[in-house]
Amino acid sequence: MCEVLTMQCQKVLEEYLNSERVDYTIQHHPVAYTAQQLAEYERVSGKMVAKSVIVYADNKICMLVLPASARVDFDKVRHELQATDVRLATEDDLRTLFPNCEVGSMPPFGNLYHLPVFVDSSLKRQENIVFPIGTHTETMKLRFADFERLVRPTICSFAQVPVRVR
């Protein structure tokens, strides 16, 4: 089994970021089951919180990363990924793909799980991003530029952003 799958998610990320000499901070907060709750607990805009959504695009598993304040526009995803069929992964899929993470708390580092990562262009406007690190009670904050350099995601447009965001 791949080492990343047997180590605690936070430890994997910390070792990876430390080896790349990336500055980051870790915060502990009350249990947050949604990215928008996480934004409230961290007292940051939902535009800054990166949530990861796992989809199957023509049966290929992909990680979509977008602001907590946005929703996935599946028509845009089909267009951007040039896929005819796009569907959400199930909770069972998430348990299998991310065995070292609580369901729904996977970090946006799909590269550590050998997944292609697609980031919505609206997230790139943030200097820093905040995201869960395998639990519903801990988050990591780092510069978007560092995230982009390490993950090398495809930047595209697939988020449906509400008219007003705090």
Image (tube, rainbow, N blue to C red):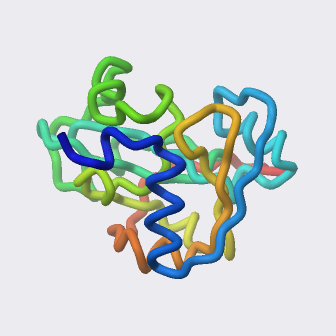
In the image, 59 versus 129, the foreground residue is 129
Q: Is 69 left or right of 1, judged from the image as shown?
A: right
Q: Is 118 left or right of 126, judged from the image as shown?
A: left
Q: Name the residue rendered at 80%, 30% in the picture.
A: 30
The picture places residue 45, in percent across and down from the top left corner, at 79, 54
Q: Does 139 appear above or below 125? A: above
The picture places residue 32, in percent across and down from the top left corner, at 71, 30
Q: Name the residue rendered at 35%, 25% in the picture.
A: 95
Image quadrant holding the N terminus, namely top left
Tell me how many marks there are: 0
Q: Does 51 appear above or below 149? A: above
Q: Does 137 appear above or below 50? A: above
Residue furthest to the top: 92
The picture places residue 79, in percent across and down from the top left corner, at 26, 54
The picture places residue 106, in percent across and down from the top left corner, at 47, 41
In the image, 145 versus 138, the foreground residue is 138
Q: Name the residue rendered at 73%, 27% in the picture.
A: 31
Q: Does 114 appear above or below 124? A: above
Q: Quadrant of residue 141?
A: bottom right
Q: Quadrant of residue 111?
A: bottom left
